[in-house]
């Protein structure tokens, strides 16, 4: 296992190099000029040319990219074009903490609610409970974020006045309830469906019937034998759901005024702030790699028969 983890981590720099090259290329050849954005109304051709020289944007593509990679290897992601005197890390670090708290809480809620409901649907297969849970999963999985968020704001903020409409005041403030609901409901629906399908495949296995014939309590049978052996596809889903949470968090942060990385990335794209765009992209790619590595490790924890060489 240790060799496998090291081998996967050794691939991380190569993956980040590929991601950085693609992102840097899109920024270099994409529309818009950061020098013009920085100058604003003072953007005359002479001023733009001088500003580009000061920012180092007049150099060849490979020279700029090589300089960026060299500085990144020394933990320097550059200085923001839009926020003068502020490094990329200074801008991203506090917002990364906010986004990590939001997405981590949403993932935890999704797992704690979705997996038990999916297991209950499998146990009650063919009953009205099973039908209700599957219908719930299909309904909320089909709802887009931009429809769920305004509806919840209309009901819980404008009508009932239960929660603040926007802002970030910490993980345990009532203002986080609506963003978490919007992020968690589709993910809960996904885990209900996958847990139910996976549990139904396991429940008909011989070792489950043997466990019941031994007189084990049904709770022990469902948790120790059914759920544990049904966890592999659920772990895979948890690793992949990070992508859905990240994309959903971008919209949620914008709608609810949460100062997270997604909100910063949208602002950076609109202002052609390419160092910030590069920084947020690299951090997102790193998060995906680490999430998939954790999922691979959890495979072996859930099923001791799985071995990595």
Image: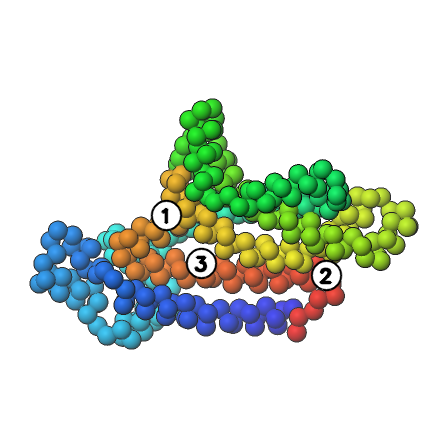
Q: Quadrant of residue 276?
A: bottom left
Q: Earlier in the sequence, mark 2 or mark 3?
A: 3
Note whether residue 103 is visible.
Answer: yes
Residue of label 2: 303
How many labels were placed on the picture?
3
Residue of label 1: 263
Q: Earlier in the sequence, mark 1 or mark 2?
A: 1
What is the x, y in percent for residue 221? Answer: 81, 48
- Please give the name of the residue rendered at 74% of the width and 66% of the height, measured from the top-left corner: 305
For numbered disc 2, what is the local secondary structure?
loop
Q: Is residue 223 above or below residue 278?
A: above
Image quarter in which the N terminus is found: bottom right
- In this view, the residue in front, 140 or 303, is 140
What is the x, y in percent for residue 172? Answer: 50, 35
Can you tell which mark lies on residue 162? none
- In this view, the residue in front, 112 or 185, is 185
For numbered disc 3, what is the local secondary structure?
helix
Residue of label 3: 284
């Amino acid at each position: 296992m240790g060799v496998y983890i090291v081998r996967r981590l050794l691939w991380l720099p190569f993956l980040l190099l590929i991601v950085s090259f693609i992102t840097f290329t899109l920024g270099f050849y994409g529309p818009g000029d950061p020098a013009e954005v920085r100058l604003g109304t003072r953007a005359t051709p002479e001023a733009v040319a001088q500003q580009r020289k000061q920012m180092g944007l007049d150099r060849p593509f490979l020279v700029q990219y090589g300089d960026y990679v060299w500085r990144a290897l020394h933990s320097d992601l550059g200085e923001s074009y839009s926020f003068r005197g502020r490094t990329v890390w200074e801008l991203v670090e506090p917002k990364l903490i906010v986004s990590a708290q939001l997405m981590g809480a949403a993932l935890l809620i999704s797992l704690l609610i979705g997996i038990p409901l999916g297991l209950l649907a499998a146990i009650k297969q063919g009953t009205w409970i099973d039908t209700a849970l599957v219908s719930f999963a299909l309904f909320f999985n089909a709802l887009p974020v931009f429809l769920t968020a305004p509806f919840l704001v209309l009901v819980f903020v404008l009508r009932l006045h239960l929660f603040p409409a926007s802002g970030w005041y910490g993980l345990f403030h009532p203002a986080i309830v609506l963003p978490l609901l919007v992020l968690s409901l589709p993910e809960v629906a996904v885990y209900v469906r996958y847990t139910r399908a996976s549990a139904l495949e396991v429940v008909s296995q011989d070792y489950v019937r043997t466990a019941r014939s031994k007189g084990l309590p049904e709770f022990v049978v469902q948790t120790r034998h059914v759920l544990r052996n049904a966890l592999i596809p659920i772990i895979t889903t948890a690793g992949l759901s990070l992508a859905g949470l990240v994309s959903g968090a971008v919209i949620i942060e914008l709608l609810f005024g949460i100062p997270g990385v997604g909100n910063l990335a949208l602002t950076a794209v609109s202002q052609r702030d390419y160092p910030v765009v590069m920084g947020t992209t690299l951090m997102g790619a790193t998060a995906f790699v680490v999430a998939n590595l954790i999922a691979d490790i959890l495979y072996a924890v859930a099923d001791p028969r799985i071995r990595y060489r």
